[in-house]
Amino acid sequence: MAEEKTTAQVEETAAEAKQEVKEQAPKQDPKEFLENFNWEKYEEGIERVDDSKLEEFEKLVAENFVDTADEEVVEGKVVYLTDREAIIDINAKSEGVISLNEFRYNPNLKVGDKVEVLIDIREDKSGQLVLSHRKARTIMAWDRVNAAHDKEEIVSGFVKCRTKGGMIVDVFGIEAFLPGSQIDVKPIRDYDQYVGKTMEFKVVKINHEFKNVVVSHKALIEADIEEQKKEIISQLEKGQVLEGVVKNITSYGVFVDLGGVDGLVHITDLSWSRINHPNEVVELDQKINVVILDFDENKSRIQLGMKQLEKHPWDALSDEIKIGDKVKGKVVVIADYGAFIEVVEGVEGLIHVSEMSWSTHLRSAQDFVKVGDEVEAVVLTLDREDRKMSLGIKQLTPDPWTDITTKYPVGSKHSGIVRNFTNFGVFVEMEEGIDGLIYISDLSWTKKIKHPSEFVSVGDKMEVEVLELDVEGRKLSLGHKQTTENPWDKYEAEFAVDTVHKATISDIVDKGATIDFNEDITAFIPQRHLEKEDGKKLGKGDEAEFKIIEFNKDFKRVVASHTAIFREEEQRNVKAAQKKAAASADEAKPTLGDANEALQALKDKMEGKK
């Protein structure tokens, strides 16, 4: 009955309220109506409200109040901000509180901003409305991410942390992956500088199966750069000077960003001075002025220069420098053929290895100087038009060949150092700048030398005699054996032809054998001269007497024979028998047969027959 009475009272009140609305003019403001409305009288049925007022009330409630059902996403308004929290009004019975950590992606959050929230709990134990912005974003995130991807829209994201290969970005509450290669168009050296920043991105890939999202900041930059690039390329001209930023440094040159277009400054175009690496001149992210030297038809490969913006050092070279002047400089490069000396910045002269020392035997530039050395030299040639200069070091000291005839006359004996070998002789340094050659035939009187290394070593000290002197050709011919007595002079008498010597066969060689009479004399015995009296031949180690049948002092040739010793005796016996036979012929007058018999007996005796 109470319920029916209440309904009747409400209907009556509504009718009265409707009648009052018709009589009232102008219409009352809804907000004012709500503030002045007496709810207690209405609930007790004391005050009646007409139908129009009730309809207006219901409409006002629908427009301004939300149904605070749990797990529902609604739109709220930031009404107050503290250091840690945001107070959100969703037109509910009470206001909600959300930690500012949920708004890290939006550091510009301010009072009045509208945000999406999820009603976690309509009323907790303390009567507080519990809201969540993070959950609300997550619920709506996938729809927004898909829409942003399909429409290629730009989204805002908060860089949360660094990970392997890139960064983790909060986009609409979803953790998206930002690859390192998609952060910027230029290489990134410090990833940590982006952590905690809010940046704009483009959604480039979505994997619905694994709920993965990939975003790119580089794509936004490239779009802007592409427009700039087209504009820059259309205006490129040779000789044009532009400002750029060093983007990358390699061993062969520097890549410069001209505002969307990259150009290369080769290492040889960085400085007029010789440099070993581009980082000696420029550094990363440095702003530099460059001039366009060349580009291809599509203007995609642009060759730039830096040194061309400065005056060539040769043009600034003092006119006072002339041939014969002494200059100082630093060794910048060493090659096999010489060393380059930087006389002034950008101006180099070559000291050929032949101008480093008066010495004529082969040496390397590294034997005289090394990179970084400060040296003094004499200007030998100077060509300002071709920008070439040759220098010399040896000219700082007197030419040792000036008084060579006085110091090293033919026949004089000296001491020198072995500096080098050739197949035909030895180079001996008499002093710095004066070398002489000893031919292999002038090393020893007696030894047969195939290569000089068999006789001496580099660095050995040798006694020499000057054999020939060519001042104009700067050639000095030396001999070593001439400093000692020629042993073949005395051997010529000792081992004269027909002299007999006792010796042992030392070796069997092709076509004969050899015997060593002493440390200098080695004789050769031909094969047919090895035969003994019994018809057999001498072998290695056999001792016998030998007759010298040839001695040549000039060619150091000695030939001996064992067979000649007993063959000579046989010949003497034959002659003696012939004489004896002739003498007895007159006495006995033997017949022809007797004579033949006597000769046969003598022959048999000679052949060892009985």
Image (cartoon, rainbow, N blue to C red):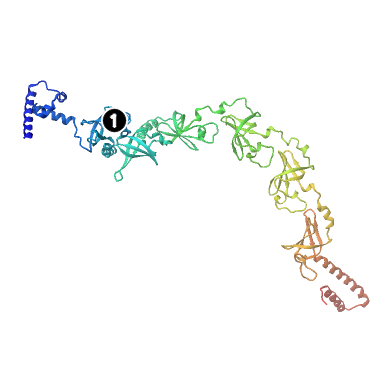
Q: Is residue 323 left or right of residue 38?
A: right
Q: Is residue 207 left or right of residue 393?
A: left
Q: Is residue 357 left or right of residue 521?
A: left
Q: Is residue 204 above or below residue 529?
A: above
Return the x and y of residue 90 as percentages of the image width and height: 22, 31
Element marked by disc 1: strand
Which is more toward the observer, 71 or 233? 71
Residue drawn at (56%, 26%) of the image: 316
Q: Is residue 143 left or right of residue 378?
A: left
Residue 300 seen in the current view: no
Return the x and y of residue 185 as percentages of the image width and height: 39, 35
Q: Is residue 463 above or below residue 248?
A: below
Where is the N terminus found, in terms of image quarters? Answer: top left
Number of callouts: 1
Residue at mark 1: 86
Residue drawn at (69%, 37%) of the image: 358
| Residue extending farthest top | 25
User: Amino acid type of disc 1?
Assistant: Ala
Q: Is residue 540 above or below residue 259?
A: below
Which is more toward the observer, 475 or 503? 503
Which is more toward the observer, 284 or 100? 100
Residue 526 seen in the current view: yes
> Residue 67's quadrant in the figure?
top left
Return the x and y of residue 237 as percentages of the image width and height: 43, 30
Return the x and y of residue 286 as percentages of the image width and height: 46, 30
User: Label 1: how many residues lie within 10 Å, few (<14), some (14-19) or many (20+)?
Assistant: many
Q: Is residue 158 above or below residue 462?
A: above
Where is the C terminus found, in terms of image quarters? Answer: bottom right
